[in-house]
Amino acid sequence: MKRLKPQKSHIILVILVALFIQLLGPGAQADTLRLYYGSEPSENFMQAHPGVEIVYTDYERDYRNTYEIIAALLTNTFDYDVFELGTWKYDMHQIMDKGYCIDLSQSDLIRTELERMHPVISAQMKRNGIIYAIPRSIQCDVYLTDQEGWLAAGFSEQDIPQSFPQLFDFLEAWCHRAQSTKDERIKVRNTWDESVYGPHSYTTWLVQTLIENHIMQCGFAGLPIRFEDETFLDLLRRSKEVGSLLYETEPVPNASHQLIESASGGGSRWPDNVPGRLISMRLNAGQPKLISATLSSLAVYARTGQMTLAIAYLEDVLTQRTDKWNQPYFSQAMLYQNAQPIKNPNTQEELDSTNARIEDMKRKLEDEHLSLSEKNELRASLEKSEAMLIEIKQREYRLSPEQLRDYQALVDKLYFPTPGPFYVTTDTGQEVLKLIARYCASNISANEIMMELDRIARMMELEGM
């Protein structure tokens, strides 16, 4: 039997295919982009890259903190091209400094976009002037006076505490007033889970908030975290005294009104009149009034085999102005200096139809042939529609001109704390929570918890954490 000889063209084709596969290398398939908590690309991106398959996060391989994600990056078991750097759980700058993110400064578009953002935000994306990430969204966490509760209690803007000592003075005075008047309509906070509320609830909240703000002030000042301090010790003691007094005043939690609310702004909303309601939790009047904030940002893994495609994806995310329903992204207004108010897309139709109903009813009321009962019925409907119109106008904006003005007045006070070893998902963070519980239960003294916190901080510093 005669053997067929392979044609020369077939041999050349096989060699070219083999060379192409070798050039791509492992994990660098030309049609796959792997995202760790990345967002969906736009239709424009998919049309420009028609063969690309987007692979999203494997949630079973979630990295809870800086140490877990660095371990994956260090051992080369991290197999994503683009990854999220959320400042609420990762030390973003440590990851950049270790060389795990590529330099994005080569992109003219990314450089231009960052120049248009608030400097306090764009600075977080850089190290030594080099861009390593792009911001995707921002969230601010603040304590505010509750507008209705504060007014119902007869307080004004001048009564708002501007430091921890002032907060303690205010809470003590409020407890004495509430005990004397026995008014149950207003509580300090009304968001407690009643199934777990108990004698240590307020004390735990005060101690945790005190520790968080002390760490934040140390970080802002560029100082090592230290707890052995007479001022801090005094505030620890007062936390327990005031916390116990609050429970004594409010043995039954929650009410129709509260004095203090914990609010978040930036993800999809911004609270009204933040400058006129902001409670500062600084430890003394000499410290700056900081607003704790977190950023969601995206970076390209330094070992990616898809650098060009990954940068194109980041450029696409950065320039997406509207969602798939063609509505403006709320986060855009938080990031950019030249942001504009955002209207609620659903209210214009409501405004038009309600105005049309009002005008129609006004015309009908001019009819001389209407009976008295018909006129009364129309007037009642007109009154309801006019009240509805006021309510709709209050919902006209997702981000009103006033809210945007308030945010821009405060943006320079934003501070992005590093989630260090005291972060709740670390073993040390869990140890601190247990330590706080022991203090609240009077199993250790204020001096003992202070010294133990200081020991942990020094130990973490020696270990380079």
Image (tube, rainbow, N blue to C red):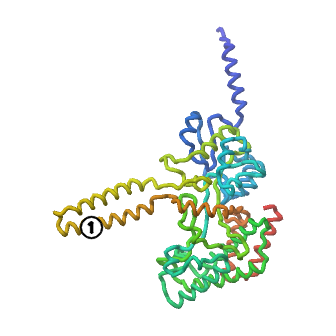
Q: Where is residue 366 in the image (x, y as percent from the top left)?
A: 22, 62
Q: Which of 403 and 296 is in front in this view?
A: 403
Badge count: 1
Q: Which of 110 and 13 is in front in this view?
A: 110
Residue 380 placement: quadrant? bottom left
Q: Where is residue 265 in the image (x, y as percent from the top left)?
A: 57, 62
The structure residue drawn at horizontal position 61% and vertical position 54%, both measured from the top left corner, is 137
Q: Quadrant of the C terminus?
A: bottom right
Instruction: Determine if residue 424 is in view.
Output: yes
Is residue 412 found left or right of 259 in the rendered image? right
Q: Where is residue 355 in the image (x, y as percent from the top left)?
A: 34, 58
Q: Mark 1 points at which residue?
A: 379
Identify which amino acid the numbered label 1 is placed on. Arg
Instruction: Tell me the element at label 1.
Output: helix
Is residue 369 found left or right of 334 in the rendered image? left
The extreme right residue here reads 462
